[in-house]
Protein backbone atom coordinates (compact mmCIF):
# COMPACT_ATOMS: atom_id res chain seq x y z
CA UNK A 1 0.00 0.00 0.00
CA UNK A 2 2.83 2.37 0.82
CA UNK A 3 4.38 1.66 -2.58
CA UNK A 4 1.10 2.54 -4.30
CA UNK A 5 0.99 5.76 -2.30
CA UNK A 6 4.56 6.63 -3.28
CA UNK A 7 3.80 5.92 -6.95
CA UNK A 8 0.84 8.28 -6.54
CA UNK A 9 3.12 11.03 -5.23
CA UNK A 10 5.48 10.57 -8.19
CA UNK A 11 2.66 10.67 -10.76
CA UNK A 12 1.12 13.77 -9.16
CA UNK A 13 4.49 15.47 -9.10
CA UNK A 14 5.05 14.63 -12.78
CA UNK A 15 1.60 15.93 -13.74
CA UNK A 16 2.27 19.24 -11.97
CA UNK A 17 5.79 19.45 -13.40
CA UNK A 18 4.43 19.08 -16.96
CA UNK A 19 1.73 21.63 -16.19
CA UNK A 20 4.18 24.24 -14.88
CA UNK A 21 6.79 23.44 -17.54
CA UNK A 22 4.25 24.05 -20.30
CA UNK A 23 3.88 27.68 -19.20
CA UNK A 24 7.44 28.26 -20.41
CA UNK A 25 7.26 26.25 -23.62
CA UNK A 26 5.23 26.13 -26.84
CA UNK A 27 5.30 28.07 -30.10
CA UNK A 28 2.93 30.71 -31.38
CA UNK A 29 2.65 31.85 -34.98
CA UNK A 30 0.42 34.80 -35.85
CA UNK A 31 -0.83 34.53 -39.43
CA UNK A 32 -1.88 37.71 -41.34
CA UNK A 33 -5.56 36.64 -41.11
CA UNK A 34 -5.42 36.10 -37.33
CA UNK A 35 -3.64 39.43 -36.95
CA UNK A 36 -6.19 41.41 -38.97
CA UNK A 37 -9.10 39.81 -37.14
CA UNK A 38 -7.52 40.60 -33.78
CA UNK A 39 -6.82 44.24 -34.70
CA UNK A 40 -10.45 44.65 -35.81
CA UNK A 41 -11.91 42.95 -32.75
CA UNK A 42 -9.84 45.15 -30.43
CA UNK A 43 -10.70 48.31 -32.33
CA UNK A 44 -7.05 49.41 -32.63
CA UNK A 45 -6.78 52.63 -34.62
CA UNK A 46 -3.08 53.45 -34.31
CA UNK A 47 -1.35 52.86 -37.67
CA UNK A 48 1.98 53.10 -35.85
CA UNK A 49 1.04 50.11 -33.68
CA UNK A 50 -0.60 48.13 -36.49
CA UNK A 51 2.38 48.40 -38.85
CA UNK A 52 5.20 48.01 -36.36
CA UNK A 53 3.62 45.11 -34.51
CA UNK A 54 2.87 43.36 -37.78
CA UNK A 55 6.55 43.55 -38.73
CA UNK A 56 7.63 42.12 -35.39
CA UNK A 57 5.18 39.26 -34.87
CA UNK A 58 3.37 38.17 -38.04
CA UNK A 59 4.60 34.87 -39.55
CA UNK A 60 7.24 34.50 -36.85
CA UNK A 61 7.55 31.56 -34.45
CA UNK A 62 7.61 33.00 -30.95
CA UNK A 63 7.09 31.88 -27.38
CA UNK A 64 4.11 33.21 -25.40
CA UNK A 65 6.50 35.42 -23.43
CA UNK A 66 8.14 36.89 -26.54
CA UNK A 67 4.83 37.44 -28.28
CA UNK A 68 3.24 39.11 -25.25
CA UNK A 69 6.19 41.35 -24.52
CA UNK A 70 6.49 42.49 -28.16
CA UNK A 71 2.81 43.48 -28.22
CA UNK A 72 3.02 45.40 -24.97
CA UNK A 73 6.30 47.10 -25.94
CA UNK A 74 4.78 48.22 -29.22
CA UNK A 75 1.62 49.46 -27.54
CA UNK A 76 3.71 51.58 -25.18
CA UNK A 77 5.84 52.89 -28.05
CA UNK A 78 2.71 53.68 -30.04
CA UNK A 79 1.19 55.64 -27.14
CA UNK A 80 4.40 57.60 -26.75
CA UNK A 81 4.42 58.34 -30.46
CA UNK A 82 0.80 59.55 -30.33
CA UNK A 83 1.49 61.76 -27.32
CA UNK A 84 4.41 63.38 -29.17
CA UNK A 85 2.19 64.44 -32.07
CA UNK A 86 1.24 68.14 -32.25
CA UNK A 87 -2.41 67.15 -31.72
CA UNK A 88 -3.04 63.97 -29.75
CA UNK A 89 -5.66 61.70 -31.34
CA UNK A 90 -7.13 59.98 -28.30
CA UNK A 91 -8.80 57.32 -30.47
CA UNK A 92 -5.34 56.04 -31.29
CA UNK A 93 -4.23 55.64 -27.70
CA UNK A 94 -4.20 52.01 -26.52
CA UNK A 95 -5.34 51.85 -22.91
CA UNK A 96 -2.82 49.86 -20.92
CA UNK A 97 -3.34 48.62 -17.38
CA UNK A 98 -1.35 45.76 -15.86
CA UNK A 99 -4.49 44.04 -14.53
CA UNK A 100 -6.31 44.18 -17.86
CA UNK A 101 -3.92 44.43 -20.80
CA UNK A 102 -2.65 40.85 -20.74
CA UNK A 103 -6.01 39.18 -20.26
CA UNK A 104 -8.20 41.43 -22.42
CA UNK A 105 -5.81 42.64 -25.11
CA UNK A 106 -2.96 40.13 -25.48
CA UNK A 107 -4.59 36.82 -24.50
CA UNK A 108 -7.05 36.50 -27.45
CA UNK A 109 -4.18 36.79 -29.95
CA UNK A 110 -1.90 34.37 -28.09
CA UNK A 111 -4.78 31.89 -27.70
CA UNK A 112 -5.65 31.86 -31.40
CA UNK A 113 -2.05 31.69 -32.63
CA UNK A 114 -1.00 28.58 -30.67
CA UNK A 115 0.68 26.05 -32.88
CA UNK A 116 3.00 23.03 -32.70
CA UNK A 117 3.01 19.92 -30.53
CA UNK A 118 0.51 21.08 -27.89
CA UNK A 119 -2.18 21.91 -30.45
CA UNK A 120 -1.70 18.64 -32.36
CA UNK A 121 -1.61 16.31 -29.33
CA UNK A 122 -4.25 17.65 -26.96
CA UNK A 123 -5.40 14.19 -25.79
CA UNK A 124 -1.87 13.03 -24.93
CA UNK A 125 -1.16 16.40 -23.37
CA UNK A 126 -4.28 16.06 -21.22
CA UNK A 127 -3.09 12.64 -20.02
CA UNK A 128 0.38 13.93 -19.20
CA UNK A 129 -0.93 16.80 -17.06
CA UNK A 130 -4.42 16.30 -15.65
CA UNK A 131 -4.44 12.55 -16.25
CA UNK A 132 -1.26 11.97 -14.24
CA UNK A 133 -2.21 14.45 -11.51
CA UNK A 134 -5.72 12.98 -11.04
CA UNK A 135 -4.60 9.32 -11.09
CA UNK A 136 -1.64 10.19 -8.86
CA UNK A 137 -3.89 12.02 -6.39
CA UNK A 138 -6.25 9.05 -6.18
CA UNK A 139 -3.33 6.66 -5.65
CA UNK A 140 -2.10 8.86 -2.81
CA UNK A 141 -5.43 8.86 -0.97
CA UNK A 142 -7.05 5.48 -1.63
CA UNK A 143 -4.39 3.40 0.20
CA UNK A 144 -5.24 5.37 3.37
CA UNK A 145 -8.31 3.17 3.64
CA UNK A 146 -5.96 0.37 4.72
CA UNK A 147 -2.91 2.30 5.90
CA UNK A 148 -4.74 4.39 8.49
CA UNK A 149 -6.46 1.39 10.09
CA UNK A 150 -10.07 1.24 11.29
CA UNK A 151 -12.58 3.99 10.48
CA UNK A 152 -12.18 7.13 12.56
CA UNK A 153 -10.63 10.56 12.14
CA UNK A 154 -6.84 10.35 12.13
CA UNK A 155 -5.28 13.78 12.46
CA UNK A 156 -2.11 12.30 13.89
CA UNK A 157 1.00 14.39 13.30
CA UNK A 158 -0.94 17.22 11.66
CA UNK A 159 0.96 19.82 13.68
CA UNK A 160 4.32 18.19 13.00
CA UNK A 161 3.97 17.97 9.23
CA UNK A 162 5.53 20.73 7.18
CA UNK A 163 2.60 20.74 4.73
CA UNK A 164 -0.10 21.27 7.35
CA UNK A 165 1.63 23.44 9.91
CA UNK A 166 2.96 26.35 7.89
CA UNK A 167 6.23 24.61 7.13
CA UNK A 168 8.26 24.85 3.97
CA UNK A 169 5.89 22.55 2.01
CA UNK A 170 2.94 24.65 3.18
CA UNK A 171 4.60 27.83 1.93
CA UNK A 172 5.55 26.23 -1.40
CA UNK A 173 1.93 25.09 -1.83
CA UNK A 174 0.65 28.58 -1.02
CA UNK A 175 3.13 30.05 -3.49
CA UNK A 176 1.83 27.68 -6.18
CA UNK A 177 -1.84 28.48 -5.44
CA UNK A 178 -1.25 32.24 -5.37
CA UNK A 179 0.83 32.10 -8.55
CA UNK A 180 -1.85 30.10 -10.33
CA UNK A 181 -4.58 32.60 -9.42
CA UNK A 182 -2.45 35.55 -10.51
CA UNK A 183 -1.84 33.91 -13.89
CA UNK A 184 -5.49 32.91 -14.22
CA UNK A 185 -6.98 36.31 -13.39
CA UNK A 186 -4.40 38.63 -14.90
CA UNK A 187 -2.05 36.77 -17.27
CA UNK A 188 -3.96 33.92 -18.97
CA UNK A 189 -1.81 34.52 -22.08
CA UNK A 190 0.82 32.32 -20.37
CA UNK A 191 -1.67 29.52 -19.62
CA UNK A 192 -2.53 28.71 -23.22
CA UNK A 193 -0.87 25.27 -23.17
CA UNK A 194 -2.79 24.06 -20.08
CA UNK A 195 -5.94 25.51 -21.69
CA UNK A 196 -5.24 23.46 -24.83
CA UNK A 197 -5.16 20.28 -22.73
CA UNK A 198 -8.88 20.68 -21.92
CA UNK A 199 -9.87 21.99 -25.35
CA UNK A 200 -11.38 18.65 -26.42
CA UNK A 201 -13.57 18.45 -23.32
CA UNK A 202 -14.79 22.00 -23.82
CA UNK A 203 -15.65 21.37 -27.46
CA UNK A 204 -17.56 18.22 -26.63
CA UNK A 205 -19.58 20.01 -23.92
CA UNK A 206 -20.37 23.42 -25.37
CA UNK A 207 -18.92 23.28 -28.88
CA UNK A 208 -16.61 26.20 -28.04
CA UNK A 209 -12.83 26.22 -27.66
CA UNK A 210 -11.66 26.18 -24.05
CA UNK A 211 -11.02 29.49 -22.31
CA UNK A 212 -9.10 30.14 -19.10
CA UNK A 213 -12.44 29.97 -17.24
CA UNK A 214 -13.19 26.54 -18.64
CA UNK A 215 -9.73 25.42 -17.51
CA UNK A 216 -10.45 26.81 -14.06
CA UNK A 217 -13.85 25.09 -13.87
CA UNK A 218 -12.36 21.78 -14.95
CA UNK A 219 -9.48 22.01 -12.47
CA UNK A 220 -11.86 23.05 -9.70
CA UNK A 221 -14.07 19.99 -10.24
CA UNK A 222 -11.10 17.64 -10.59
CA UNK A 223 -9.41 18.86 -7.41
CA UNK A 224 -12.68 18.67 -5.51
CA UNK A 225 -13.29 15.12 -6.74
CA UNK A 226 -9.84 13.84 -5.77
CA UNK A 227 -10.03 15.46 -2.33
CA UNK A 228 -13.64 14.30 -1.89
CA UNK A 229 -12.28 10.74 -2.14
CA UNK A 230 -9.92 11.63 0.69
CA UNK A 231 -12.90 12.96 2.69
CA UNK A 232 -14.92 9.79 2.03
CA UNK A 233 -12.08 7.69 3.44
CA UNK A 234 -11.27 9.94 6.37
CA UNK A 235 -14.86 10.43 7.54
CA UNK A 236 -16.32 7.10 6.41
CA UNK A 237 -17.83 6.42 9.84
CA UNK A 238 -19.70 9.72 9.80
CA UNK A 239 -22.91 9.80 7.76
CA UNK A 240 -23.25 13.59 7.92
CA UNK A 241 -19.80 14.16 6.42
CA UNK A 242 -20.26 11.48 3.75
CA UNK A 243 -23.57 12.88 2.52
CA UNK A 244 -22.46 16.49 2.80
CA UNK A 245 -19.30 15.84 0.77
CA UNK A 246 -21.25 13.99 -1.93
CA UNK A 247 -23.87 16.75 -2.17
CA UNK A 248 -21.43 19.65 -2.36
CA UNK A 249 -19.44 17.81 -5.03
CA UNK A 250 -22.63 17.18 -7.00
CA UNK A 251 -23.61 20.86 -6.90
CA UNK A 252 -20.18 21.93 -8.09
CA UNK A 253 -19.94 19.48 -10.99
CA UNK A 254 -23.58 19.65 -12.12
CA UNK A 255 -24.63 23.23 -11.35
CA UNK A 256 -21.41 25.20 -11.64
CA UNK A 257 -19.75 23.26 -14.47
CA UNK A 258 -21.87 20.95 -16.63
CA UNK A 259 -25.24 22.74 -16.76
CA UNK A 260 -23.76 26.17 -17.65
CA UNK A 261 -21.63 24.60 -20.42
CA UNK A 262 -24.61 22.69 -21.80
CA UNK A 263 -26.67 25.90 -21.76
CA UNK A 264 -23.99 27.55 -23.89
CA UNK A 265 -24.16 24.62 -26.33
CA UNK A 266 -27.84 25.53 -26.81
CA UNK A 267 -27.01 29.21 -27.33
CA UNK A 268 -28.31 30.17 -23.91
CA UNK A 269 -26.46 32.35 -21.39
CA UNK A 270 -23.88 30.72 -19.11
CA UNK A 271 -25.74 30.56 -15.80
CA UNK A 272 -25.05 28.98 -12.42
CA UNK A 273 -28.47 28.45 -10.82
CA UNK A 274 -27.07 28.21 -7.30
CA UNK A 275 -24.86 31.29 -7.35
CA UNK A 276 -26.74 33.92 -5.35
CA UNK A 277 -26.16 37.68 -5.14
CA UNK A 278 -24.05 39.20 -3.52
CA UNK A 279 -21.56 36.36 -4.03
CA UNK A 280 -22.54 36.59 -7.68
CA UNK A 281 -21.79 40.31 -7.63
CA UNK A 282 -22.25 40.88 -11.36
CA UNK A 283 -25.81 39.53 -11.36
CA UNK A 284 -27.34 43.04 -11.47
CA UNK A 285 -24.78 44.52 -13.89
CA UNK A 286 -26.44 46.03 -16.95
CA UNK A 287 -24.79 43.62 -19.41
CA UNK A 288 -25.99 40.63 -17.39
CA UNK A 289 -29.57 41.86 -17.00
CA UNK A 290 -29.72 42.73 -20.72
CA UNK A 291 -28.25 39.39 -21.73
CA UNK A 292 -30.76 37.45 -19.62
CA UNK A 293 -33.76 39.52 -20.68
CA UNK A 294 -32.78 39.17 -24.34
CA UNK A 295 -32.47 35.38 -24.10
CA UNK A 296 -36.14 34.54 -24.29
CA UNK A 297 -38.27 32.87 -21.63
CA UNK A 298 -35.40 30.88 -20.17
CA UNK A 299 -33.34 34.05 -19.72
CA UNK A 300 -36.24 35.80 -17.98
CA UNK A 301 -36.72 32.75 -15.76
CA UNK A 302 -32.99 32.87 -14.88
CA UNK A 303 -33.29 36.52 -13.91
CA UNK A 304 -36.42 36.00 -11.80
CA UNK A 305 -34.88 32.89 -10.20
CA UNK A 306 -31.72 34.86 -9.31
CA UNK A 307 -33.82 37.50 -7.53
CA UNK A 308 -36.01 34.91 -5.74
CA UNK A 309 -32.93 32.91 -4.72
CA UNK A 310 -31.45 35.92 -2.93
CA UNK A 311 -34.62 37.40 -1.45
CA UNK A 312 -36.66 34.32 -0.59
CA UNK A 313 -34.90 30.96 -0.92
CA UNK A 314 -31.71 31.95 0.90
CA UNK A 315 -33.31 33.48 4.04
CA UNK A 316 -36.08 30.87 4.28
CA UNK A 317 -33.61 28.00 4.03
CA UNK A 318 -31.32 29.67 6.58
CA UNK A 319 -34.27 30.01 8.92
CA UNK A 320 -34.89 26.28 8.80
CA UNK A 321 -31.38 24.84 8.43
CA UNK A 322 -28.86 27.59 9.17
CA UNK A 323 -26.34 28.88 6.67
CA UNK A 324 -24.84 25.42 6.40
CA UNK A 325 -27.35 24.50 3.69
CA UNK A 326 -25.50 26.93 1.41
CA UNK A 327 -21.96 27.30 2.78
CA UNK A 328 -21.25 23.64 3.40
CA UNK A 329 -23.69 21.82 1.11
CA UNK A 330 -24.13 23.88 -2.06
CA UNK A 331 -21.55 26.65 -2.56
CA UNK A 332 -18.52 26.05 -4.76
CA UNK A 333 -16.19 28.10 -2.52
CA UNK A 334 -17.37 26.11 0.48
CA UNK A 335 -17.02 22.92 -1.54
CA UNK A 336 -13.37 23.60 -2.29
CA UNK A 337 -12.74 24.59 1.33
CA UNK A 338 -14.31 21.35 2.57
CA UNK A 339 -12.33 19.11 0.21
CA UNK A 340 -8.99 20.60 -0.84
CA UNK A 341 -9.01 22.73 2.31
CA UNK A 342 -9.71 19.99 4.85
CA UNK A 343 -6.02 19.37 5.67
CA UNK A 344 -5.66 23.05 6.60
CA UNK A 345 -8.72 23.67 8.81
CA UNK A 346 -6.65 23.73 12.03
CA UNK A 347 -4.74 26.79 10.79
CA UNK A 348 -7.66 29.20 11.31
CA UNK A 349 -6.88 31.85 13.89
CA UNK A 350 -9.01 31.55 17.06
CA UNK A 351 -8.00 34.83 18.71
CA UNK A 352 -10.45 37.51 19.76
CA UNK A 353 -8.55 39.94 17.55
CA UNK A 354 -9.20 37.88 14.42
CA UNK A 355 -12.89 37.67 15.37
CA UNK A 356 -12.98 41.48 15.48
CA UNK A 357 -11.16 41.76 12.13
CA UNK A 358 -13.56 39.20 10.68
CA UNK A 359 -16.64 41.20 11.65
CA UNK A 360 -15.32 44.48 10.26
CA UNK A 361 -14.07 42.95 7.04
CA UNK A 362 -16.96 40.71 6.09
CA UNK A 363 -19.61 43.31 6.86
CA UNK A 364 -17.51 45.94 5.09
CA UNK A 365 -17.49 43.79 1.95
CA UNK A 366 -21.27 43.31 2.22
CA UNK A 367 -21.70 47.07 2.48
CA UNK A 368 -19.40 47.60 -0.53
CA UNK A 369 -21.36 45.04 -2.58
CA UNK A 370 -24.69 46.61 -1.59
CA UNK A 371 -23.58 50.15 -2.45
CA UNK A 372 -22.10 49.02 -5.76
CA UNK A 373 -25.27 47.14 -6.69
CA UNK A 374 -27.48 50.05 -5.58
CA UNK A 375 -25.53 52.42 -7.83
CA UNK A 376 -25.61 49.89 -10.67
CA UNK A 377 -29.40 49.59 -10.48
CA UNK A 378 -29.78 53.35 -10.16
CA UNK A 379 -27.92 54.06 -13.40
CA UNK A 380 -29.67 51.14 -15.09
CA UNK A 381 -33.17 52.41 -14.36
CA UNK A 382 -32.23 56.08 -14.82
CA UNK A 383 -30.74 55.07 -18.20
CA UNK A 384 -27.40 56.72 -17.40
CA UNK A 385 -24.38 55.09 -19.11
CA UNK A 386 -22.33 53.25 -16.47
CA UNK A 387 -19.09 54.95 -17.62
CA UNK A 388 -20.53 58.43 -16.93
CA UNK A 389 -18.94 60.15 -13.94
CA UNK A 390 -21.45 60.50 -11.11
CA UNK A 391 -19.53 62.08 -8.24
CA UNK A 392 -15.92 63.13 -7.57
CA UNK A 393 -15.05 62.01 -11.08
CA UNK A 394 -16.08 58.42 -10.29
CA UNK A 395 -18.39 56.39 -12.51
CA UNK A 396 -20.36 53.25 -11.65
CA UNK A 397 -18.07 51.39 -14.01
CA UNK A 398 -15.10 52.44 -11.82
CA UNK A 399 -16.83 51.15 -8.68
CA UNK A 400 -17.64 47.84 -10.42
CA UNK A 401 -14.04 47.54 -11.62
CA UNK A 402 -12.64 48.16 -8.11
CA UNK A 403 -14.99 45.59 -6.62
CA UNK A 404 -14.14 43.06 -9.32
CA UNK A 405 -10.42 43.61 -8.81
CA UNK A 406 -10.14 43.86 -5.02
CA UNK A 407 -12.94 41.53 -3.94
CA UNK A 408 -13.79 39.34 -6.95
CA UNK A 409 -10.19 38.55 -7.91
CA UNK A 410 -7.72 39.39 -5.14
CA UNK A 411 -9.77 38.59 -2.04
CA UNK A 412 -11.88 35.64 -3.15
CA UNK A 413 -9.27 33.99 -5.39
CA UNK A 414 -5.69 34.98 -4.70
CA UNK A 415 -6.08 35.39 -0.92
CA UNK A 416 -9.17 33.21 -0.37
CA UNK A 417 -7.68 30.06 -1.84
CA UNK A 418 -4.02 30.95 -2.12
CA UNK A 419 -3.70 31.30 1.64
CA UNK A 420 -5.28 27.94 2.56
CA UNK A 421 -1.93 26.53 3.74
CA UNK A 422 -1.18 29.65 5.80
CA UNK A 423 -4.48 30.93 7.23
CA UNK A 424 -6.77 27.93 6.99
CA UNK A 425 -9.34 26.85 4.48
CA UNK A 426 -12.11 29.40 4.98
CA UNK A 427 -10.25 32.68 4.58
CA UNK A 428 -12.73 33.97 2.01
CA UNK A 429 -15.86 32.52 3.65
CA UNK A 430 -14.87 33.87 7.04
CA UNK A 431 -13.40 37.27 6.22
CA UNK A 432 -14.74 38.27 2.83
CA UNK A 433 -17.83 36.60 1.43
CA UNK A 434 -20.73 39.10 1.39
CA UNK A 435 -23.26 36.29 0.98
CA UNK A 436 -21.90 34.61 4.12
CA UNK A 437 -22.38 37.94 5.95
CA UNK A 438 -26.00 38.11 4.77
CA UNK A 439 -26.67 34.47 5.69
CA UNK A 440 -24.93 35.09 9.00
CA UNK A 441 -27.36 37.86 9.98
CA UNK A 442 -30.30 35.52 9.42
CA UNK A 443 -28.56 32.65 11.20
CA UNK A 444 -27.70 34.75 14.22
CA UNK A 445 -31.05 36.46 14.70
CA UNK A 446 -33.72 34.40 12.96
CA UNK A 447 -32.91 30.74 12.52
CA UNK A 448 -33.59 27.45 14.21
CA UNK A 449 -30.03 26.25 13.70
CA UNK A 450 -27.72 25.96 16.67
CA UNK A 451 -25.09 23.58 17.98
CA UNK A 452 -26.25 22.27 21.32
CA UNK A 453 -23.72 21.26 23.95
CA UNK A 454 -23.86 18.67 26.66
CA UNK A 455 -21.43 20.60 28.82
CA UNK A 456 -21.22 18.07 31.63
CA UNK A 457 -19.45 15.64 29.28
CA UNK A 458 -16.83 18.07 28.02
CA UNK A 459 -13.28 17.23 29.01
CA UNK A 460 -11.89 20.49 27.60
CA UNK A 461 -9.63 18.67 25.15
CA UNK A 462 -10.04 21.53 22.64
CA UNK A 463 -10.36 19.34 19.55
CA UNK A 464 -13.51 21.20 18.51
CA UNK A 465 -11.88 24.64 18.64
CA UNK A 466 -8.72 23.37 16.95
CA UNK A 467 -10.56 21.99 13.92
CA UNK A 468 -13.18 24.72 13.60
CA UNK A 469 -12.32 26.25 10.25
CA UNK A 470 -14.20 29.45 11.12
CA UNK A 471 -12.00 30.13 14.13
CA UNK A 472 -14.85 29.73 16.64
CA UNK A 473 -13.73 28.82 20.13
CA UNK A 474 -16.26 26.00 20.36
CA UNK A 475 -14.77 24.65 23.56
CA UNK A 476 -15.56 27.80 25.52
CA UNK A 477 -19.26 27.32 24.69
CA UNK A 478 -19.11 23.60 25.53
CA UNK A 479 -17.50 24.27 28.88
CA UNK A 480 -20.41 26.54 29.76
CA UNK A 481 -23.03 24.20 28.33
CA UNK A 482 -24.13 27.04 26.07
CA UNK A 483 -25.62 26.72 22.58
CA UNK A 484 -23.32 27.83 19.79
CA UNK A 485 -25.23 30.45 17.84
CA UNK A 486 -22.66 32.29 15.78
CA UNK A 487 -23.25 34.08 12.51
CA UNK A 488 -19.97 32.73 11.13
CA UNK A 489 -20.63 29.02 11.79
CA UNK A 490 -20.94 27.26 8.43
CA UNK A 491 -22.28 24.07 9.98
CA UNK A 492 -19.51 21.89 8.59
CA UNK A 493 -20.04 19.58 11.55
CA UNK A 494 -16.35 18.85 12.04
CA UNK A 495 -16.36 20.12 15.64
CA UNK A 496 -18.98 17.52 16.41
CA UNK A 497 -17.13 14.84 14.43
CA UNK A 498 -13.82 15.32 16.25
CA UNK A 499 -15.31 15.55 19.75
CA UNK A 500 -14.36 12.38 21.62
CA UNK A 501 -17.22 12.80 24.11
CA UNK A 502 -20.22 13.41 21.87
CA UNK A 503 -20.78 16.83 23.42
CA UNK A 504 -21.82 18.74 20.30
CA UNK A 505 -24.91 18.31 18.16
CA UNK A 506 -26.03 20.33 15.13
CA UNK A 507 -29.76 20.88 15.46
CA UNK A 508 -32.61 22.49 13.49
CA UNK A 509 -35.56 21.49 15.68
CA UNK A 510 -38.10 24.20 16.47
CA UNK A 511 -36.97 26.46 19.24
CA UNK A 512 -38.86 29.02 21.28
CA UNK A 513 -36.20 31.58 20.52
CA UNK A 514 -35.26 32.46 24.08
CA UNK A 515 -33.58 29.16 24.89
CA UNK A 516 -31.62 29.19 21.63
CA UNK A 517 -29.34 32.03 22.62
CA UNK A 518 -29.69 31.75 26.38
CA UNK A 519 -26.45 32.10 28.31
CA UNK A 520 -26.23 29.86 31.34
CA UNK A 521 -25.28 31.57 34.58
CA UNK A 522 -22.16 29.80 35.62
CA UNK A 523 -19.19 30.79 37.68
CA UNK A 524 -15.82 30.97 36.06
CA UNK A 525 -12.57 31.36 37.96
CA UNK A 526 -12.32 35.02 37.04
CA UNK A 527 -15.81 35.87 38.25
CA UNK A 528 -15.21 35.60 41.98
CA UNK A 529 -12.45 36.49 44.35
CA UNK A 530 -11.91 33.20 46.20
CA UNK A 531 -9.41 34.71 48.61
CA UNK A 532 -11.83 37.35 49.90
CA UNK A 533 -14.55 34.67 50.28
CA UNK A 534 -12.20 32.44 52.26
CA UNK A 535 -11.19 35.34 54.49
CA UNK A 536 -14.86 36.21 55.08
CA UNK A 537 -15.61 32.68 56.32
CA UNK A 538 -12.58 32.70 58.60
S1 LIG B 1 -18.57 25.65 15.00
FE1 LIG B 1 -18.43 23.53 14.23
S2 LIG B 1 -19.93 23.41 12.58
FE2 LIG B 1 -19.55 25.59 12.97
S3 LIG B 1 -17.92 26.15 11.54
FE3 LIG B 1 -16.92 25.57 13.47
S4 LIG B 1 -16.43 23.39 13.22
FE4 LIG B 1 -17.94 23.90 11.63
S1 LIG C 1 -14.01 18.36 21.53
FE1 LIG C 1 -15.72 17.83 22.87
S2 LIG C 1 -14.76 17.25 24.79
FE2 LIG C 1 -13.20 18.33 23.59
S3 LIG C 1 -13.37 20.48 24.26
FE3 LIG C 1 -14.70 20.26 22.46
S4 LIG C 1 -16.71 19.79 23.29
FE4 LIG C 1 -15.23 19.45 24.93
Image (tube, grey):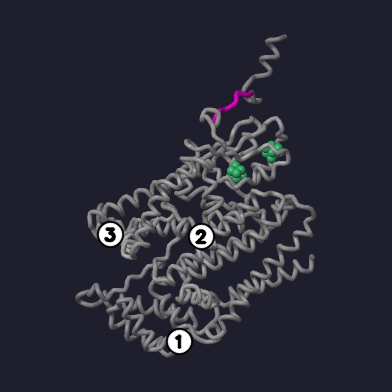
Residue 519 is one of the magenta-drawn residues: yes
How far apart are the two marked residues, 1 and 3, measured between alpha carbons? 38 Å
Q: Nearer the viewer, residue 421 or 203?
A: 203
Tag 3's secondary structure? Answer: loop
> What residue is drawn where x is 54% and y is 60%?
252
Ligand 1 under 8 Å from disc 1 Cβ: no
From the viewer's perspective, is 12 left or right of 390? right
Q: Is residue 379 left or right of residue 301?
A: left
Q: Distance between the Cα atoms at labels 1 and 2?
A: 32 Å
Task: Determine the residue positioned at 63% across, 52% down.
Answer: 243
Mark linked to residue 386:
3
Rendering coords of residue 360 (x, y %): 46, 43
The dominant secondary structure in magenta is loop
- Binning the other alpha carbons within 10 Å of mark 3 as few (below 14), some (14 to 19) or many (20 upward) gives many
Residue occupied by mark 1: 29
The mark that comes first in sequence, 2 or 3, is 3
Looking at the picture, how far across and down is residue 306, in whole percent?
40, 54
Q: Which residues are magenta?
A: 517-522
Residue located 27% across and 61% down the image: 387
Amino acid sequence: MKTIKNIGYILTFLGFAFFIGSIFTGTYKVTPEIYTKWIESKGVKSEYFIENTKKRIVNKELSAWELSSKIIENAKASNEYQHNQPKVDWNKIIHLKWSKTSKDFVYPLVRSSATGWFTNNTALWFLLTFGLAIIGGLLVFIPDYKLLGPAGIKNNGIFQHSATNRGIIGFITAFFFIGFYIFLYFFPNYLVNPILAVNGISKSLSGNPASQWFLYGFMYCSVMTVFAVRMFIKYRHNKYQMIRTAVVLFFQIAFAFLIPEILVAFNKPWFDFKNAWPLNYSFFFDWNINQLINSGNLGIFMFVWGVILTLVVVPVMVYFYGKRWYCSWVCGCGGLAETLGDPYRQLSNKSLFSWKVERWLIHGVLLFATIMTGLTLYVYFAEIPSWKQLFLGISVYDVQTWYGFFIGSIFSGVIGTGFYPIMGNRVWCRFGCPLAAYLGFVQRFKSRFRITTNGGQCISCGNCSTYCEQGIDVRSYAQKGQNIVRSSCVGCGICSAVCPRGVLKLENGSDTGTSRTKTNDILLGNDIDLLSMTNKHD
